[in-house]
Image (spheres, rainbow, N blue to C red):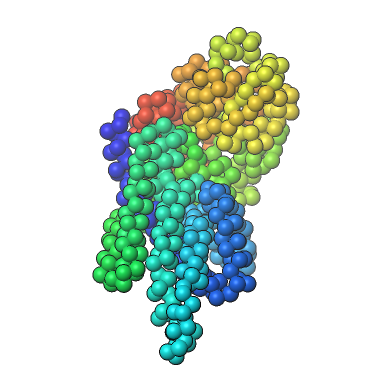
Amino acid sequence: MNGGSFAAAWAVLPEYLGQHVLLSLSAILLGTAISLPLGIAAARSRMLREPVLSIANIVQTIPGLALLALFYPILLALSSIAVRAFGFRIPALGFLPALLALTLYSMLPILRNTIAGLTGLDPTVKTAARAVGMTSWQSLWIVELPLAAPLIMAGIRIAAVWVIGTATLSTPVGQTSLGNYIFTGLQTENWVFVLFGCVAAAALALAIDLLLALAENGFALRSKSRVLTAAAGVLLVILASLYPLAGAAQQQVTIGAKNFDEQYTLSALIADRLAQAGIPASRRSDLGSTIIFRALAAGDIDVYVDYSGTIWANQMHRSDSPGRAELLRQTAQWLAAKYGIRDLGPLGFENAYVLAMRSDRAKALGIRTLADLALDAPRLKIGGDYEFFSRPEWAKVVKAYGLHFGAQQTYQPTFMYRALQDGDADAIAAFSSDGRIAEYHLALLADPKSALPPYDAILLVSRKHAHDAKLIAALQPLIGRLDLSSMQRANLMVDRDKRTPEEVAKWLATKMR
């Protein structure tokens, strides 16, 4: 398993590293381009100095992942305005939101060090420059900036390390980076991937920091050779990282995936189908339910698998239960009418939210249904994934059964099952297609009031490709061909056997022939 994981990690390194370097480099260059002139202006104006540093400090207090995520709805709103006013769309997912967030993150150390470097100069230096007839700007460019350069370079070094590290968090907003290793590895418990991503990001940050340190030292010693060597080294790292991207095929179709094993496997299966049809595609994984749907509606991704109950409750804001067939019909009709999204139909299995307990624990307490659970809930702890407790389905379940737990805890889906097994949680919001239900002998609690809607896996295509005959023909064979037992087995292969989603997707493809 480790050998296969290591080989799989190496296979995607050129793409992940290249995208990570491209994003980090762009953010550092843009942050420097903004911060240097702003720092110079702030150094010369006390009125400007405090507001600029205060704003930069505030930005730095925002958690990196939150800052990255905040730009998605902002760009989505701006894109909507741009489409109505000018007829063009601003990409709200991927590179742009990550670039903007990381640029803001890079600014504080550059601003601080630029201001400190210029305001900390010996006043006699400026006086001497003026005495020989230099103008204010000549003094700045010929005397002050060269003297402040080592300190400014130190700020750029700090910014570079921050940006390279924080760029690993750009995966949830659809930007490929070395963070793909970490997010996917944590979800699938592939510790080789997690370690590989951490080491790769740390090695990149260390290499860039050492080269920038050489440049800083060169400025301090007035050594052009050291500065040029450092510049050549940085350029070499950049070119070596970006070279594999130069020969990459133009991506035509973007496949989306949420942040759990089943979605990774399904996106790999879709990619395999498109590859067989000669349609180049890329994948964007670890997207939240709301973000991935909005991305499809906005055209930032082109195809992904969602679940009928999620669309029904989260997007359509429906709480009634008209039955599976009618729910599917109305969902497809609403998607087409409101967003031009084409619902190709159900894949053949349901991945429903279902409350589960350890069989021995449920038997000891005499709990078989959600109504039974409500009686003991105040003395129990419940666990759920990142989304469940904020979803309207949970609010409906709570209202229907009067559920009030003693404690409520959020987990990454993989660790949620471990928490149940270890006794850290008494019940969890499990997924019906998860192979770990049978593996751990979990008891699934009945929902006699049908508070939870059906969650058929449905294949959705964006407006842009809704009538793309070649793409539709490539994906149509997936409809109705994946049964629940096959999907449970596939998920268990990833969770327990540590097979990669790509390997499992190929296994599923053979079962469908």
Image position, residue 344 (x, y; %): 52, 41
Residue at 32%, 56% in the rendered image: 210
Front one among 84 and 170: 170
Image position, residue 446 (x, y; %): 63, 19
Q: Is residue 407 above or below residue 38?
A: above
Front one among 217 and 440: 217
Farthest residue toward the bottom?
133
The number of numbered discs placed on residues in the rendered structure image is 0
Give the side of residue 288 with respect to residue 181, left or right: right
Residue at 50%, 40% in the rendered image: 258
Give the side of residue 437 with respect to residue 373, left or right: left
The answer to whether residue 278 is seen in the rendering is no
Residue at 52%, 33% in the rendered image: 412
Image position, residue 219 (x, y; %): 34, 69
The answer to whether residue 51 is seen in the rendering is yes
The N terminus appears in which quarter of the rendering?
top left
The C terminus appears in which quarter of the rendering?
top left
Q: Is residue 367 above or below residue 41?
A: above
Image position, residue 310 (x, y; %): 60, 37
Answer with the quarter of the image where residue 359 lies: top right
Front one among 74 and 282: 74
Q: Is residue 26 above or below residue 295?
A: below
Residue at 58%, 13% in the rendered image: 361
